[in-house]
Amino acid sequence: MNFRQLKAFDTVMRLGSITGAAKALNVSQPSVTRLVRELETHVGFALFMRRGRGVAATVEARRFHQAVESAFLNIERLDDLASTIRKTAVGKLSVGVTPTFSLSLLPDVLGQLRKEEDDTHTIVYIHNTPAIVDAVRLQQFDIGIVSRSPPYTGVYSLYQTEVNYVALVPQNHPLAASTDRLDLREVAGREEFITFGNVYPLEMQGMDEDLAIQFQSKAKFSVANVLAATALARAAGVPALVDPFSARMSASGGGMVIRPIQQKLTYHIGIITRGIEVMTRETRQLADAIISRFETDPLIVAGGQS
């Protein structure tokens, strides 16, 4: 590390903005960004995270900045401190996740991180979205993966996106004969579908009441858990409207067909935490890995359609 890197870091810490720091130092904004990134590479941990139009200092950055202020030119001492922070930042990490993502996403992410970092002890809790939001708000979970519509009261949203529900159809069902988008108005009241929680479903944003009533009129099964609905669809030979991640898991086992639907019925996805300022290195590492996986998932890239 060098004086220019530390000066850029110190100025961003005081002003809370890359742009403000660039003006104060009379250099370009890319120059400040580059200096901060070089310092992050040297010390081995992130210093800032984006927040609105500015940046927020990480837990490690605030600790590191105390030493920078008191010993600006003592580079050797700061090197030692950075090494200590790296070695002592490892600990436990608790994750709350909905059932779907406990099977379809989180294991792959944790498996990949396991190859890169062996020291973090990750505790996984599987709950529904309201329970996860409550637990994050009460500081019981460090991070949550949720699947209902925002806002999530009392927590900070790191990531939000949405995809469309799909029809999961047994391969020998008449509706499996086509791969075209399925118009739900043509099949509601005529074909039996598995309904969701007996109110088809509250969180399937976009289904109007008349259409929901038509589906309920033919339904013999109502299931409050999407993964259970996919299993029942296979066992009973009855189509179900489910999120595309659960549908993909079911279809990968064979015997099931996924059909996109014409209606926009939205499935929400969110990553939540207590706040950027209290996120540890391990929490940020996991959050970044989950968000990266979502952002490159074909279902999200394609808008949730298979």
Image (tube, rainbow, N blue to C red):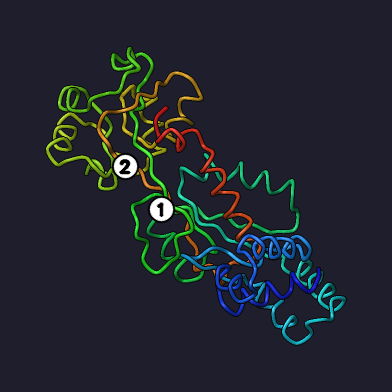
State how far apart marks 2 and 1 are (Cα). Answer: 17 Å
Farthest residue to the left: give it.
Answer: 210
Tag 2: amino acid:
Thr
Q: Position of residue 273 (x, y in %)?
A: 50, 63
Q: How many marks?
A: 2
In this orientation, which residue lies closer to the viewer: 111 or 278?
Answer: 278
Which is nearer the N-term, disc 2 or disc 1? Answer: 1
Q: Residue at x 34, y 31 (%)?
A: 166
Name the residue carrying label 1.
128
Q: In the displayed structure, would residue 238 be above or below residue 123? A: above
Quadrant of the snapshot with the N terminus: bottom right
Q: Secondary structure at mark 2?
A: strand
Local crowd size for mark 1, using a 10 Å CA cut-off: few (<14), some (14–19), many (≥20): some
**In the rendering, at what x and y percent does residue 194 appear?**
28, 32
The x, y position of residue 226, in whole percent, is 38, 39
Q: Nearer the viewer, residue 70 or 102?
A: 70
Instruction: Tell me the residue at 26%/45% (across/down).
Output: 205
